[in-house]
Amino acid sequence: MSLVCESGLDPIRPFKLFDKNSDFLKSSLKLVVLVLLLGSISLFLRSIFSGQTRWFNDPTRNIPVVHETHVSGALNISHIVFGIGGSTRTWSDRRHYSELWWNPNRTRGFVWLDEKPDPNSTWPDTSPPYRVSEDWTRFKYSSSRAAVRIARIIVETFRVGLPNVRWFVMGDDDTVFFTDNLVSVLARYDHKKMWYIGGNSESVEQDVMHSYDMAFGGGGFAVSYPLAKELVNVMDGCLDRYYRFYGSDQRVWACVNEIGVSLSRERGFHQIDIRGDPYGLLAAHPVAPLVSLHHLDSVKPLFPNQTQLESLRTLTQAYRVDPARTLQQSFCYYPTWKQKWSISISWGYTVQIYPSLLTASELERPMRTFLTWRSWKNGPFTFNTRPVNPYPCEQPVLYYLDWVKEVGNGESVSGYKKYGKENECGKADYRRAVERIIVSAAKMDPGEFKAPRRQCSEISSLRYGKMKVRIRSCKPGETITS
């Protein structure tokens, strides 16, 4: 016993040492577990907030570097880049719409396809150059995967990095743009600020279903460079947040809305969300430049006895002579002891002669020759309409553009030929009295739309079945009845 005590040896010491080591190991293990747990939580949170399904974007995330050149001077078509949504399946049938307005020597942009076209075919020189959309199948969607791809066109067009860009304009492969008027509209806005410009649907049911605050994409919409730059940063995460939306334009609107930019409406962008005959709509165009037409395969041809493509070529002939005046409406009266007529002119398209005196508020209201887009009903529309008079003797005589030409000194002359049967009304005098109408006008200054006013017109002569009408700026104090 004394030996044990003297030696200082403790028979239970090894077990005490084991207990101390065990406590140390337990503490170390707890620390490791805590570190792993915190790391797992961190990775989990990172996957939520930085992945494709994120709700909040990282402001430090790298944005593709695009060379931005500050261009001075007036806006022209070279400052605009078009992004056209197309597909290899539809392009061969629809490319003719784009070729009506695309000018390879002036316009810039691309048609974005879902896949490469047939390598055995040659891409037409008259079409916009094509690009193939990036991998868009990784995004969530509920009803239309193609809508995701088309919504990203603005991002992909921006990333191409073309220089001297002020505006990005989106449209479909069946959208017809009137580019001179597009330039004059966008020139009224400061391209250094964030702008989202376009138009609504004509059918209320469409606006209610999607949004009144949305620019409908088929009619085309414009995004300024600064806004496009912001969209590049938020678009991909934004698309997953709104994957339940139906169309590409609704997705873009939602992303623009997150940035805080509201729609600036321009009445010359036409979605053409109507069925039937667009005549009444185009014959009473608002006092605004004609910028675009869409859904032309879904309505009757603009001109009788022509295909839709032939009709557009006819309208384009007038547009090239006087872009700003195209479809602009003007009224005048022919009140004599024998006749009391109302004449409505939609320049470059049609003239109507009514056998009675109608007020300006009646003449400017489109005749309801069309139905709503989805339900095929008589309305409601986003503008006032009037029914087609059921009595043949009260209906207007219709004249359609036959020819148009420039005559020098900034002047134009256009001819309109009567269309329709004479035996539809027993009172044939007003239907037989005028066979052709000749309209003269000075070339319209786009600046007049800054303070929109419908121009005046007057009949200069009527003899031998030919009526001559002059369109001009209204005189001081002049009205349609004075």
Image: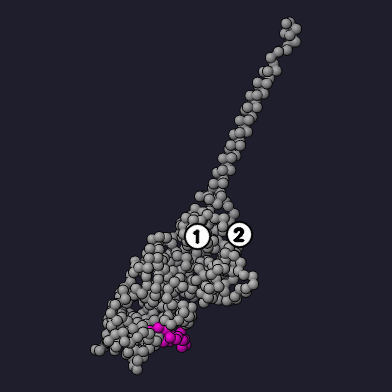
Nearer-the-camera pick, 102 or 187: 102
Q: Over which residues does the magenta segment extend?
A: 399-415
Name the secondary structure under disc 2.
loop
Residue 199, given in percent of the width and then of the height, sits at 43, 66
- Quick one: label 1, few (<14), some, or many (20+) residues within 10 Å? some
Side (left or right) of 429 relative to 439: left
Residue 272, given in percent of the width and then of the height, sits at 42, 70
Residue position for label 1: 144
User: What quarter of the picture does the N terminus occupy?
Assistant: top right
Which residue is drawn at the image coordinates 69% and 14% (left, top)? 12
Nearer-the-camera pick, 185 or 276: 276
User: Which dot marks residue 65?
Assistant: 2
User: Which dot marks residue 341?
Assistant: none
Main structural element of the magenta stretch: helix, strand or loop? strand
The vertical placement of 144 against 336, above or below, is above
Nearer-the-camera pick, 258 or 246: 246
The vertical placement of 270 against 21, above or below, is below
Name the secondary structure under disc 1.
loop
Q: Residue furthest top?
A: 2
Q: Residue furthest left?
A: 337
Which residue is drawn at the image coordinates 59% and 34% (left, top)? 34
Residue 472, given in percent of the width and then of the height, sits at 38, 82
Specify the amino acid type for callout 2. Val
Q: CA distance from mark 2 to mark 1?
A: 31 Å
Where is residue 264, by image quadrant? bottom left
